[in-house]
Each structure stands twice: as structure tokens, then as C-alpha cells.
Amino acid sequence: MTVREKLALLEELFELDEGALHEEMELTELENWDSMAKLSLIVLMDDEFGKELSGEQIRSFVTIQDILRLME
């Protein structure tokens, strides 16, 4: 999966327009970075990548790149 495809998954998750996210963007810039988005991210990571996220991991995320690193 390419970086663009991963960003597209995240854009869908955060209900953003295509191309709205970039790797260096800080999560605090996202209006939709709330508890529901975090729960949805947990489900996405499990369903699409077979990875379980902990609350501690999610709290450590600062940028979109931090999420992308776990999508490998």
C-alpha cells in the first residue's frame, strides 16, 4: 500500500476531502481528532493492518507520519 493510499484511508476516517492530509500535519490541526476518531483508528489498524493500538500509542502520536509508520 502506498503512502497516498494510506493517507486516503485516514482522510476517509477523519471525514476529510481527498488530498487534505499530508505527512507532516500535526493531529492537533484536525478538527475531527477526537475520541471517536481514535476509536475508529483502532478499528482501522486492526482490520486493515492486523495491528492492535494501545491508548498509550495513540497518545504518543503527534503527526500523521506517526500513524503512517504503524501502517507498515
Image: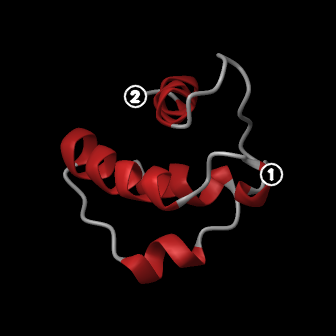
Kindly check if marks 1 and 2 are in contact, taking CB atoms under 8 A apart as contact.
no
Estimate the x, y position of residue 30 in percent, counting from the top left: 72, 47
Q: Quadrant of the N terminus?
A: top left
Q: Is 25 drawn above or below residue 16 in the view shown?
A: below
Estimate the x, y position of residue 34 in percent, counting from the top left: 57, 58
Residue at 60% over, 68% down: 61
The mark nearer the N terminus, 1 or 2, is 2
Q: Residues within 10 Å of mark 1 (few under 14, many from 20)?
A: few
Q: Is 16 drawn above or below residue 64 in the view shown?
A: above
Estimate the x, y position of residue 2 in percent, counting from the top left: 49, 27
Q: Which mark is residue 29?
A: 1
In the image, 21 versus 33, the foreground residue is 33
Number of marks: 2
Q: Hey, what amino acid is under mark 1? A: Glu
Residue 14: quarter of image: top right
Residue at 44% over, 83% down: 56
Q: Residues within 10 Å of mark 2 (few under 14, many from 20)?
A: few
> Is disc 1 placed on a helix, strand or loop?
helix
Between the C-alphas of marks 1 and 2, the distance is 25 Å
Instruction: Residue at the far bottom: name it.
Output: 56
Q: Which mark is residue 20?
A: none
Q: Hey, what amino acid is under mark 2? A: Met
Mark 1 or 2, closer to the camera: 1
Residue underneath mark 2: 1
In the image, 54 versus 2, the foreground residue is 54
Residue at 70% over, 56% down: 27
Q: Is residue 18 left or right of residue 28?
A: left
Residue at 56% over, 28% down: 15
Estimate the x, y position of residue 20 in percent, counting from the top left: 74, 26
> Is disc 2 placed on a helix, strand or loop?
loop
